[in-house]
């Protein structure tokens, strides 16, 4: 990554910058040579000033690409003639703006030494040598300070710019994370609501396919159940979308399923041919907080869906117990056939393929509710057990 001063150096090395530097130095050199032209008694001194001035102009572009070495050339020439003083001063300023303070101080010291030698070789009649040294030192110090201030300002601007870019990138990352969390929440809600309903429809559709010669009354009843299930799935989909659009939809819209709705859920499963036994010892299910009740409902719903997918035709045992201050315990157990989910003879319910994300989303839902979820496969079958907090 390029530093702020490297970026500035690349810009200063452009043809436009070179032209500007040569023009500025050339004008100052010309003014110096013209002012000293009539002061020389011999012609060689005049041509020396002119030659050194032209050479200083020629060396000026070098300080744009190599600040320190480029500034030393005009500084050395300044010891021979004041015609190189403008280029030497510009060199000190360039080094102070683009290099660290020790380097700038060294170049400034070289310029002061060169002008001190110039004062000895070509003493001025208008100013004493002591004042000449003081003036040269003060000007060189001012140039170093000006350049250092410019360099610090440039570094500050670049730092603020980089900080703004980092803040923008961080904001983009947070937006992406929020979008991902929202997508995960939508996917979990869709899975919890629709997977149960669609697995029921798959069971009825499998029955229709398996028994095309069934009595018309039975076929009509099964088709009616499929039609009703489709309508219920659409209604639940609208309900989920409403909840996702507005966080308070559970309070302002339709009531969300809670623990007291478990009997209706189990009746739907039994109507689809699933063998479900419920052992509910909760005395006051209506006292359970709505959020906890909804989590419990989704947990049982997901457990029944998984049993229907992976162990069709097998009985499912559901046990619910607990109370205020103790928490709510939900326990589901269903046998898993060794054949990988084959249904008993006479039952047209092949295993339904799953995405493998149901338990992951369910675990996250229980965790967000402040509870814990355990699931394992034992000799008795697949065991799903959850504990949810129930304040006293």
Image (cartoon, helix red, strand yellow):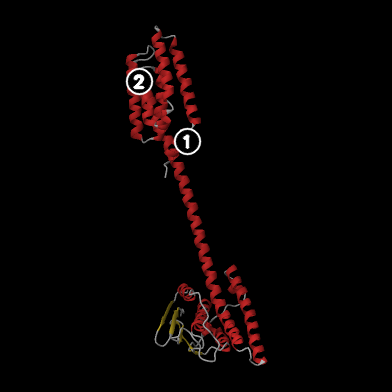
Which residue is drawn at the image coordinates 37% and 13% (left, top)? 124
The label on residue 11 is: 1
Image coordinates of residue 366 in percent, x first then y, are 47, 75
Specify which label sits upstream in the sequence, 2 or 1.
1
Image coordinates of residue 119 in percent, x first then y, are 34, 16
Answer with left or right where residue 96 lies relative to residue 170: left
**Viewer-side residue, 221 vs 160:** 221
Q: Which quadrant would the N terminus be assigned to in this image?
A: top left
Which residue is drawn at the image coordinates 35% and 27% (left, top)? 108
Question: Marks 2/1: CA distance?
Answer: 31 Å
Query: Which of the 4 quarters of the picture holds residue 77?
Result: top left
Which residue does the numbered mark 2 point to in the structure image? 115
Relative to 148, say whether 363 is above or below.
below
Answer with left or right where residue 214 lies relative to residue 288: right
Please tell me whether mark 1 sits on a helix, a strand or a loop: helix
**Viewer-side residue, 58 vs 366:** 58
**Viewer-side residue, 363 vs 221:** 221
């Amino acid at each position: 990554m390029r530093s702020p001063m490297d970026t500035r150096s690349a810009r200063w090395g452009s043809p436009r910058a070179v032209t500007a530097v040569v023009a500025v130095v050339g004008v100052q050199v010309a003014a110096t040579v013209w002012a000293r032209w009539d002061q020389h008694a011999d012609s060689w001194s005049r041509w020396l000033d002119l030659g050194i001035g032209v050479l200083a102009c020629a060396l000026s572009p070098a300080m744009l690409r190599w600040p320190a070495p480029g500034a030393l050339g005009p500084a050395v020439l300044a010891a021979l003639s004041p015609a190189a003083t403008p280029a030497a001063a510009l060199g000190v300023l360039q080094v102070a703006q683009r290099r660290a303070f020790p380097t700038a101080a060294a170049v400034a010291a070289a310029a002061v030494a060169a002008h001190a030698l110039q004062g000895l070789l070509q003493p001025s009649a208008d100013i004493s040598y002591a004042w000449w040294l003081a003036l040269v030192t003060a000007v060189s110090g001012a140039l170093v300070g000006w350049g250092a201030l410019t360099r610090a300002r440039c570094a500050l601007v670049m730092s603020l710019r980089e900080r703004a870019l980092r803040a923008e990138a961080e904001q983009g990352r947070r937006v992406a994370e929020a979008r991902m969390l929202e997508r995960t929440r939508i996917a979990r809600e869709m899975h919890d609501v629709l997977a149960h309903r669609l697995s029921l429809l798959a069971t009825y559709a499998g029955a229709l396919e398996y028994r095309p010669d069934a009595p018309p009354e039975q076929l009509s009843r099964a088709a009616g159940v499929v039609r009703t299930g489709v309508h219920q799935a659409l209604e639940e989909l609208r309900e989920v979308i409403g909840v996702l659009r507005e966080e308070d939809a559970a309070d302002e819209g339709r009531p969300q399923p809670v623990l007291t709705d478990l009997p209706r859920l189990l009746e739907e499963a039994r109507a689809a041919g699933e063998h479900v036994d419920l052992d509910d010892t909760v005395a006051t299910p209506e006292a359970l907080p709505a959020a906890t009740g909804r989590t419990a409902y989704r947990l049982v719903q997901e457990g029944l869906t998984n049993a229907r997918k992976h162990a069709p035709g097998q009985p499912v045992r559901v046990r619910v117990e607990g109370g205020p201050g103790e928490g709510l315990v939900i326990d589901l157990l269903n046998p898993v056939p060794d054949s990988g989910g084959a249904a008993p003879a006479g039952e047209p319910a092949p295993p339904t393929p799953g995405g493998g994300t149901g338990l992951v989303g369910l675990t996250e839902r229980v965790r967000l509710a402040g509870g814990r979820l355990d699931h394992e496969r034992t000799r008795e079958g697949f065991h799903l057990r959850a504990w949810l907090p129930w304040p006293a």
